[in-house]
Amino acid sequence: MFAEDFHIGAAVNPRTIKTQEQLLIHHFNSITAENEMKFESLHPLEDIYRFGAADELVIFARENHLQMRGHTLVWHNQTSHWLFQDGKGGAADRELLLARLKSHINTVVGRYKNDIYAWDVVNEAVADEGEELLRPSKWLELCGPDFIAKAFEFAHEADPQALLFYNDYNESNPLKRDKIFTLLKSLLDQGVPVHGVGLQAHWNLYDPSLDEIRSAIEKYASLGLTLQLTELDMSLFRFDDRRTDLTKPPAELLELQAERYAAVFKLLREYKEVISAVTFWGAADDYTWLDHFPVHGRKNWPFLFDEQHRPKAAYNRLLQGTLQGGKGDE
Ligand code: HXH
């Protein structure tokens, strides 16, 4: 349905490429590794890389003619501690950290240059709250703010053809949106090779509003960047809803979810000239990180396919809305 508009992707792992194999092959044309390409997964010790799990996913993509996004090179989480240490009990200095970053990026981006067309080069570097632009992190503390520009430069050198993304969450919240915009504008003004912005899109039935999503798309697109939704899911619950008693999704919530998905994709299709991919952070309700985050033991049902991989109301409504909307270029 969306083949002419944007790629439709799913986050996968070595288990789900088996348990969700047919669903992935049938409905999706792109994948992202959920955890297997993060720093601590690929590079647990300075002299040791572990590519096995990542390679499995790359081979799955190759064999099934799926595109692949790389996630992620620089992040404050799931990053090996040795990276920030000097090996003598102290902290790594800027020079050492940048040398390690360059080496890591060269190795990883170089290895997958024929298979991965886009990388989340920097993930979640912008602060959620307060006046500060950048989030406090080891990267910022030991290197200074230009760890971001350096990461993009190293990635561009390692694979000049790859599309390079800055990726973040709460991307449609006006305050965070404006900070992300400021960061991207400053990178572009310095000539840094950044090509796209990843909107994680961890959304729920109530937030963000369609108006907020539209404003965010327009604001990022005004920079001339390509946009991708990189981690879409539509939680049935508000972020801090504490209910852990449900074992089945309430019918009225699935109905709201169907409406919401249809409305969101109608909006995304309006912007198909600037949106090049929409990736879900999973594929079907039998496996989602939201079963454990932010409320442990709160089962969630955020996708278009149910726990048995059958299309949900959300899937059917999305198709209906898209067919009625015509080709989307009027
Ligand atoms: C994403 N972060 C990551 O990009 C992805 O790699 C991971 O697999 C899943 C989600 C989303 C995220 C951002 C902030 C965060 C938690 C998840 O931190 C919070 C902690 C408590 C409260 C609010 C946010």
Image (cartoon, rainbow, N blue to C red):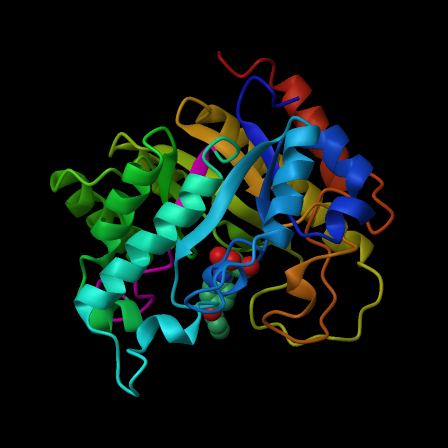
Question: Quick check: can you spot residue 119?
Answer: no
Towards the viewer: 295 or 121: 121
Q: Position of residue 158 (x, y in %)?
A: 33, 39
Residue at 39% across, 61% down = 75
Q: Check the picture and name the quadrant holding the N terminus.
A: top right
Q: Position of residue 279 (x, y in %)?
A: 57, 40
Towards the viewer: 165 or 232: 165
Residue 27 located left or right of residue 80: right
Q: Is residue 219 above or below residue 49?
A: above
Towards the viewer: 76 or 269: 76
Specify the principal SS of the magenta part: loop
Q: Is residue 298 above or below residue 13?
A: below
Residue 318 located left or right of residue 159: right
Q: Is residue 81 located in the magenta-colored stretch of the structure?
A: no
Numbered marks: total: 0
Identity of the residue furthest to the front in this view: 47
Question: Quick check: can you spot residue 106?
Answer: yes
Residue at 25% across, 75% down = 92
Q: Which residues are magenta?
A: 117-134
Q: Position of residue 141 (x, y in %)?
A: 22, 74
Where residue 261 sits, quadrant-wise, is top right
Q: Position of residue 318 (x, y in %)?
A: 68, 32
Where residue 246 sits, quadrant-wise, is bottom right
Residue at 27% across, 29% down = 224
